[in-house]
Image (cartoon, rainbow, N blue to C red):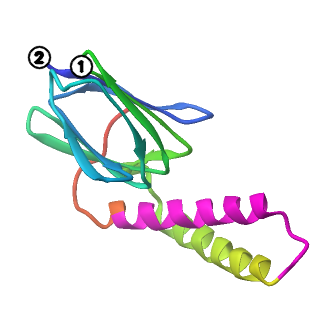
Amino acid sequence: MSLTVEIVTPDRRAYEGTADSVTLPTAMGSIGILPDHLPITAIIAAGEIIVTLDGKVSRLAIDQGFVRVVSNKVSVITEAAIDEAKIDLKSVEIAEARAREAVEAARGQKDIDPVEIAKMEQILRFALVQRLVKGRNSPGLSE
């Protein structure tokens, strides 16, 4: 018996497939999901999702979100997700530098909308997660 896994962002389905196990970064630490896992809903932390199928380990970088596990289906809703194989470190470094500069500049201003600062921090956080995930040597998931 296997798990059905779907990872959805606001603008696309980042992953859909089957797995023998899934490891997720939650607000309380990493959790592993195996077939016949008890139902659970949890907050996802920015980090790495590890999907294992037939001994092959694949990784995705994800931002914050939620996971729901019911009847061998793992559903993840997140702000952003990318397969490790599709991470372009040069683009990530550029986005990270821009976001870091923007956050630092915005923190010194009194009239900036806190939502704008939060969005810049989200970009910075996701860039850092992508760099960490890409630093591992494994094949990415295929869509």
Q: Residue at x 56, y 44 (%)?
A: 79
Element class at badge 1: loop
Q: Quadrant of residue 37?
A: top left
31 left or right, relative to 121? left
For the stretch drawn in magenta, what is the main secondary structure? helix
Dot 1 alpha-carbon crowd within 10 angstroms: few under 14, some 14 to 19, many 20 or more: many
User: Disc 2 to disc 1, how far (Cα)?
Assistant: 9 Å
Q: Quadrant of residue 31?
A: top left
Up the image or down, 86 lies above or below 68; here it is: below
98 left or right, relative to 110? left
Residue 141 pos. (x, y %): 31, 40
- In-front residue for pair 136/9: 9
107 left or right, relative to 22? right
Residue 69 pos. (x, y %): 31, 26
Residue 50 pos. (x, y %): 25, 46
Marker disc for residue 72: 1
Question: Which residues are drawn in magenta?
Answer: 109-132
Q: Residue at x 22, y 61 (%)?
A: 137
The number of numbered discs placed on residues in the rendered structure image is 2
Which of discs 2 and 1 lies nearer the camera? The answer is: 1
Residue picked out by circle 2 = 1
**What amino acid is at disc 2?**
Met
Up the image or down, 30 lies above or below 100; here it is: above
Dot 2 or dot 1: first in sequence order is 2
Up the image or down, 27 lies above or below 35; here it is: below
Element class at badge 2: loop
**What amino acid is at disc 1?**
Asn
Q: Residue placed farthest to the right in the image?
A: 111
Look at the numbered discs 2 and 1 and tell me whether their residues touch, using CB distance below 8 Å: yes
- For the C terminus, the image quarter is top left
